[in-house]
Image (spheres, grey):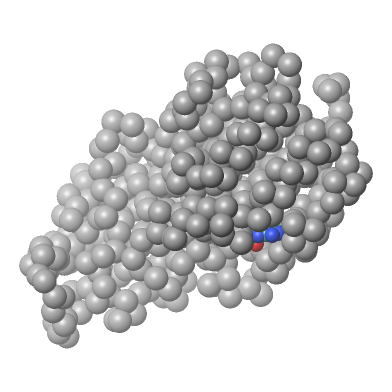
Amino acid sequence: MAASTKVRVLELYSGIGGMHWALKESGLSFEVVAAIDINTTANQIYRHNFPHVELLPSSIDKLTAAQFESWDIDAVLMSPPCQPFTRMGKKRDVEDIRTKSFIHVLHLISVVKKKPRYILVENVKGFETSEARQRLMTTLTQCSYHYQEFLLTPLQMGVPNCRLRYYLIATLAPNGFSFPTSESILEDLPKEASHWLTYNQPSCDQSRDRSTPTQNGDVCDASERTLAEAGENLRQVADETHQEYRGCQRLKHFLETQPCEYFQDFLLDDKELTRFVIMDIVQPSLKKSACFTRRYGHFVEGAGSIVQMTSNVNAVEAVSKLKSRVVDLPERPLLGEEELALLRDLQLRYFTPQEIANLLCFPAQFELPSELSRIQKYRSLGNSLNVHVVSLLIRLMTL
Ligand SMILES: C[S@@+](CC[C@H](N)C(=O)[O-])C[C@H]1O[C@@H](n2cnc3c(N)ncnc32)[C@H](O)[C@@H]1O
């Protein structure tokens, strides 16, 4: 491909356009010639951000080889539905109707005359042991692709958010990739990507309005440390002192800077507060948050972290003691007014959709249409991907 020509991209399962934003961040010269998704809300967000892309609101099973060939595709980027492979789900894999379209895409790749030079697949951890992945491998091998698989989390790239995901990049370049590949799934990016990590990390900070944009992500004062220690047992995904994640920026750089009243709407109500034992409660000075899923905003367990807005150490200590008292009881006791008052003092709130977009490394230009409900926004973001991680993989793939 001549250096001056644009890479023609087909974005499948395009959702809110995470792949498209990752392409932009990667610096690749590209054109998304078509995007396809069946979800109305996701499509509304995609169109709002990329009004000029041909977005097909139809099922990928209906895509024909002729249509595929008419687009003259150089790259296919796709995040097929992950429910058939998730740890929490039934893991019905290729038996799940939601995998049908992915199998169809593999068929299309194997029959079209001009095969896409590049393929990128994103899915949940769990996909790597599936039959669907076996079929992907078979198709790629039969079509002479070189490929590399990864299991990566944004924490490895300095972003304080867990989102361990399976990735595959493939190329038809005769000599394969320009980094050493392995048959095993890599759990780190090759050293060829290391200088992009250091280069890209600060861009997360500069691109949006944060409280201390010039501050190094590692700055944490004594009172923040005391507060963090007091609330240690309120975490579900603790351990940001883990060597690997020390380089992460602090969550405060990803939070919105708004007057207190703005966050009133995001405060947990009393019913939600009573479930505090199972929540991952984070403070802005910490370096790790839980993975935000599509259930965030109406489920407090395993759907993402909750922000603690108070900086009152006594308030945090009181709730920490309350948790120690009740956490191992065979049955959760009903909380009285006094205990609820302690919990209210923490000023616990949900991350806002904008803050989740920030943690997923969507750039400042990304917009969620204001007419969408908060739950629609959470659901769409929870289904999406980490833009920064994917942009690094696109760079590696096309290097
Ligand atoms: C994991 S999400 C992809 C998210 C996307 N990468 C993003 O950045 O938002 C999977 C997407 O596949 C879409 N989808 C599922 N089955 C589909 C099908 N048969 N045809 C088209 N889209 C489908 C869903 O609507 C959902 O938006």
- Left or right, 53 with respect to 194, comes to right
Q: Residue at x 77, y 63 (%)?
A: 58
11 to 323, vertically: above or below: above
Taking the image in four quarters, ligand 1 sits in the one at bottom right
* Residue 102 in the image, given as x and y percentages of width and height: 66, 50
Q: Where on the picture, by quarter, is residue 49? A: bottom right
- Left or right, 4 with respect to 320, comes to right
- Left or right, 12 with respect to 70, comes to left
- Residue at the bottom extreme of this rendering: 337
229 to 277, vertically: above or below: above
- Judge by depth and name the residue closer to the eye, 323 or 117: 117
Instruction: Determine if residue 158 is in view.
Output: no
* Residue 336 in the image, given as x and y percentages of width and height: 15, 84
- Judge by depth and name the residue closer to the eye, 322 or 179: 179
- Looking at the rendered image, the quarter that the C terminus falls into is top right
Q: Residue at x 20, y 79 (%)?
A: 340
Q: Where on the picture, by quarter, is residue 138? A: top right
* Residue 67 in the image, given as x and y percentages of width and height: 88, 49
- Residue at the front extreme of this rendering: 95
- Looking at the rendered image, the quarter that the N terminus falls into is top right
Q: Residue at x 62, y 51 (%)?
A: 80
Q: Residue at x 69, y 54 (%)?
A: 101
